[in-house]
Image (tube, rainbow, N blue to C red):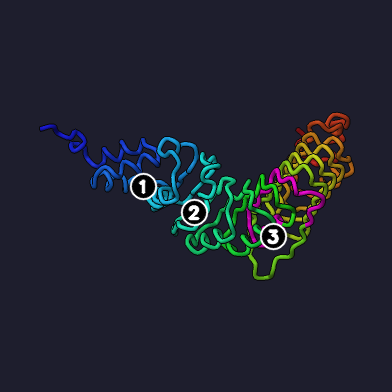
Amino acid sequence: MQRDCFSLLSDDLLVFIFSKLDTFQLYYIALVCRRWNSVVRQQVTRTQKVFLGKSLKHYFHVPNGRQILSVVRFFSQLEVLSFRNWPWIEQFPEIASVVMRGLHSTTLKELDVGGLPIQLGDIWALEENCPNISSLKLGGSPSVDDVFVKQCVKRLKPKLKVLDISDSPRVTTASVKAAVESGVTDVKASRCKRISGALVINYVPKGTEKRDNEYCLTMTQCKNLKWFHLDRNLKFNTIKLSQCTSLEYCHIYDNALEYLHLSGCVNLQSIDVVSSKLKMVNFFSCKQLSEESIYRLIENCPTLKEINLSGHDLASRLPQVLLERRLSGVHLE
């Protein structure tokens, strides 16, 4: 009688072997027998991220919603779920919607729809079935517009802290303002073609609203944005506006700001920043920025220690002695 060599292995050794498998291999291994299912369950408790991407092609021809939900539910301690690079975007584009409506998880914190179409009803189901969701990536989704974003942040506040709407073809500056006013601490809206003209944020936080110093706003490569104005003390720690090639004016009044990235803003002419904590500014390739703006920035930001002026005439034209006196010890790269 042929003996099963795997029956001679201890559970600890099986756990070590199974740890070399990917998440979907674990799912199928658990179907072999009760013992393997029990051992895999020990491994599954350590699996916190599931990426439903191209690797699924090795296991399915074209999956249905029940199969994918079964796989996702199998990982009981799931914290991150991503549909980025979903391989059946033409045959089964509504998979994100199906999973969002059918998944119940108290551990899920981050969801990336991977540019797939979703509906507002999916957000309502997500808020009810996954109450601890704090990070939502909607970038590239064709169904996401200003109304969608406003309803989304309103429904998920105050737990929603990270919102990524980058590469969304239908969002405008209204989406960014809605996210900021709803208390989202990390807003990403890069490469959004309809973000154009002026972005003015002068929201005044309510007296009971608590805002920490870790807020971040990322709007890189928004090539149609011409004027950025942030007023009031909204406590943005980092603002990234790199490669906004149409940006001409930048006005920021925020005492929590520490890092400002404006590299590649080739048409930037004037900047007015007031911050008591600003440490670093990147003006790489900002060739049209006026000298008056740079000196005014240094005067208004006493804690500034590093400024990148590579590609600007000021970096090579002024004598070192003048730099030391007027830039107050600022490191000039």
Reading the image, the residue beneath label 3 is 178
Depth order, front residue of 159/206: 159
- Neighbor class of circle 3 (other Cα within 10 Å; few <14, some 14-19, many 20+) is many
Q: Which quadrant of the structure image shows residue 58?
A: top left
Residue pictured at 55% horizontal, 49% vertical: 113
Question: Residues under labels 1 and 3: Cα distance?
Answer: 38 Å
What amino acid does circle 2 point to? Val
Residue 221 % position (x, y)? 73, 41
Secondary element type, mark 3 = helix
Up the image or down, 294 lies above or below 234; here it is above
- Neighbor class of circle 2 (other Cα within 10 Å; few <14, some 14-19, many 20+) is some
Q: Which numbered disc flags the more N-terminal residue, 2 or 3?
A: 2
- Neighbor class of circle 1 (other Cα within 10 Å; few <14, some 14-19, many 20+) is some
Up the image or down, 48 lies above or below 107; here it is above
What amino acid does circle 3 point to? Ala
Depth order, front residue of 195/236: 195
Residue 90 % position (x, y)? 55, 42
Please provide the residue range marked out in magenta.
Answer: 175-200
Residue pictured at 69% horizontal, 47% vertical: 169
2 or 3: mark nearer the eye: 2
Question: Residues under labels 2 and 3: Cα distance?
Answer: 27 Å
Question: Residues under labels 2 and 1: Cα distance?
Answer: 23 Å
Secondary element type, mark 2 = helix
2 or 1: mark nearer the eye: 2
215 on left or right of 242: left
Residue 293 % position (x, y)? 86, 44
Reading the image, the residue beneath label 2 is 98
Reading the image, the residue beneath label 1 is 44
Q: Which numbered disc flags the more N-terminal residue, 1 or 3?
A: 1
Secondary element type, mark 1 = helix
